Amino acid sequence: MATTKDKVEHILKQGQVYRDNDEELVLKYWEMQGLHLSETQKSTFISKCTGAEDIVRQRRIIQGEGRLLATEGVRKGRSKKAKRYQETKGYYYVPREED
């Protein structure tokens, strides 16, 4: 089974547009997963929509301030996922209070 990295690399090999434009890359990735948008919807997504990474980053900042938190179960799941990621990358993991 191909990893996310493998899939992204496959898309990047398909053309410079995917290397130059993150929105085009994300849209192509999601299309490979079954999301099919009209040309108008694609244009709106590329030109007007805030990127998923930016939205999630802002959620992390807000919740990092201790506001508008997810449920305890979700926080624990995110913490475990972060710990696994850090361990695979060789990072030192420092647990937060809610771990």
Image (cartoon, rainbow, N blue to C red):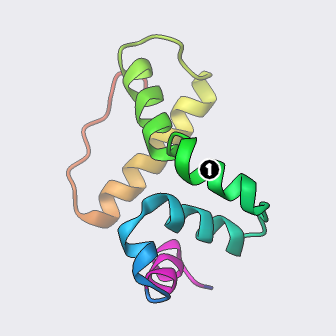
Quick one: quadrant of the N terminus? bottom right
Q: Residue at x 53, y 17 (%)?
A: 69
Q: Quadrant of residue 22?
A: bottom left
Front-most of 41 and 97? 41
Please provide percent x and percent y for residue 30: 66, 65
Indicate whether 47 appears above or below 38: above
Please provide percent x and percent y for residue 12: 44, 81
Q: Quadrant of residue 40?
A: bottom right
- The span picked out in magenta is 2-12
Indicate whether 23 appears above or below 16: above
Membership of 18 in magenta stretch: no
Q: Residue at x 50, y 86 (%)?
A: 10
> In the image, 47: left or right of 88?
right
Which amino acid is tagged 1? Phe
Determine if residue 99 is in view.
no
Indicate whether 1 appears above or below 66: below
> Which element type, helix, strand or loop, lies under badge 1?
helix
Determine if residue 27 is in view.
yes
Front-most of 61 and 46? 46
> In the image, 14: left or right of 71?
left
Please provide percent x and percent y for residue 17: 44, 75
What residue is disc 1 on? 45
Q: Quadrant of residue 26?
A: bottom right
Front-most of 9 and 79? 9
Quick one: quadrant of the C terminus? top left
